[in-house]
Amino acid sequence: MVPEQISGQIQIHPTHVPQDERDQRFMDFLSKEIQRYTPSDTFLQDFSFGFSGTKFTMEVRPKLPEIQLLRSLVFWVLGEEFKAPETVASDFILAFEEALSNVVRHSYGPEETDHWAKVYLAREGDTVHMQISDRGEAGRTSHLSDVLETISKTGRPPIKRRGGLGLYLMRRIMTDISYTPGDENCLRMYKELETNS
Amino acid sequence: MGKLSVNLSNSGNIYVVKLGGSLDSDTADILDEKMEEWIDEGKRYFVADLADLTYVSSAGIGVLVGVLNELEESGGNFKLAPLPEHVARVLEMLALLDLFEVYPDTVTGIHSYV
């Protein structure tokens, strides 16, 4: 179903009805950002989100050009809803970009078009958690656990012209990070807000 | 919305690359390809004006480092002038800030080649 414009807002999903003011605030912000970043025609059809207490999830099928829009949404949730300091939110955006671009670039093969990803954010006290899941072939990214372990042991970034720095950056930003391949590959990370260094 | 702008100007054989917007996993290739083209044309001395960069990710940093390495191998350089604090922070987190010569503005960066 093609999303329709309703009173200046964009209906995010054919069946999505704002559950509360927070849902509405998010949808209002999303509408503005869609005008700003002009994602693909299928973006809204594949996008869904939900809030539950201090938890937020969204499911997307992102293309690389849409990551900028998704960054903006995550930044908004962290700042407006989770009340994370701006520097913390900015750090999370860096990690989010790295993780999601890895999904788009590496988790799915070139012949695959369904780049499904689920983003989960939660604030628990002074800790913010982020989890990014995908259903790509685990073998494409199973080496990530080894790379993370090597980074933790050596404390150094893998220097290449392209690639390799993203995981190191995530490791530097987050208090901890882990990767579990499986039916849903899962990259989990968290940051303690009191130690923003 | 425009994602990344890359504009080139020069002062003699010193080239100022002015970047604007977001240098990330989607747009890093744009800069990479432009720099390859200019290096292939024989350009060697660059000053990167990053004042209008709104965001940089590791993909963007990877291109900056790669370009620097390639230019240094052929006697050139890729200096940063100016370097906004948010970009410096990412470079610092990646332990790569010391690789670059940094100047407060493009004029100073250009004069550093003299």
Image (spheres, grey):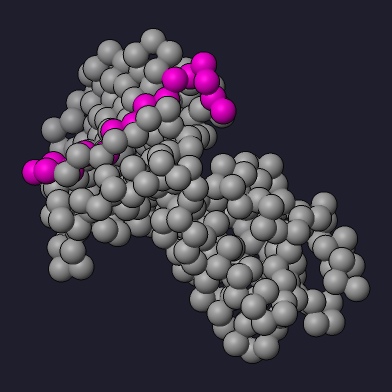
* Most distant residue in the front direction: A153
Q: Tell me if A68 is positioned left or right of B41 in this view.
A: left
The magenta-colored residue range is A182-197
Q: Position of residue A195 (x, y in %)?
A: 52, 20
Q: Is residue A186 above or below residue B99?
A: above
Q: Residue at x 62, y 44 (%)?
A: B92
Q: Residue at x 72, y 71 (%)?
A: B77
Q: Position of residue A18 (x, y in %)?
A: 24, 23
Q: Is residue A116 above or below residue B37?
A: above
Q: Position of residue B80 (x, y in %)?
A: 72, 59
Instruction: Using the rendered image of the protein, determine whether residue A43 is visible from the camera's viewpoint.
Output: no
Q: Is residue A83 above or below residue B110?
A: above
* Most distant residue in the bottom direction: B41
Q: Tell me if A111 is positioned left or right of B12 in this view.
A: left
Quarter of the image with the C terminus of chain A in it? top right
> Observer-nearest residue: B101 or A153?
A153
* Residue A9 lies in quadrant: top left
* Residue B89 lies in quadrant: top right
Q: Tell me if A94 is positioned left or right of A1 in this view.
A: right
Q: Residue at x 34, y 25 (%)?
A: A129
Q: Tell me if B56 is positioned left or right of B74 in this view.
A: left
* Most distant residue in the top direction: A125
Q: Residue at x 80, y 82 (%)?
A: B13
Instruction: Tell whether position A14 is magenta.
Output: no
Instruction: Tell whether position A192 is magenta.
Output: yes
Instruction: Using the rendered image of the protein, determine whether residue B36 is visible from the camera's viewpoint.
Output: yes
Q: How many marks?
A: 0
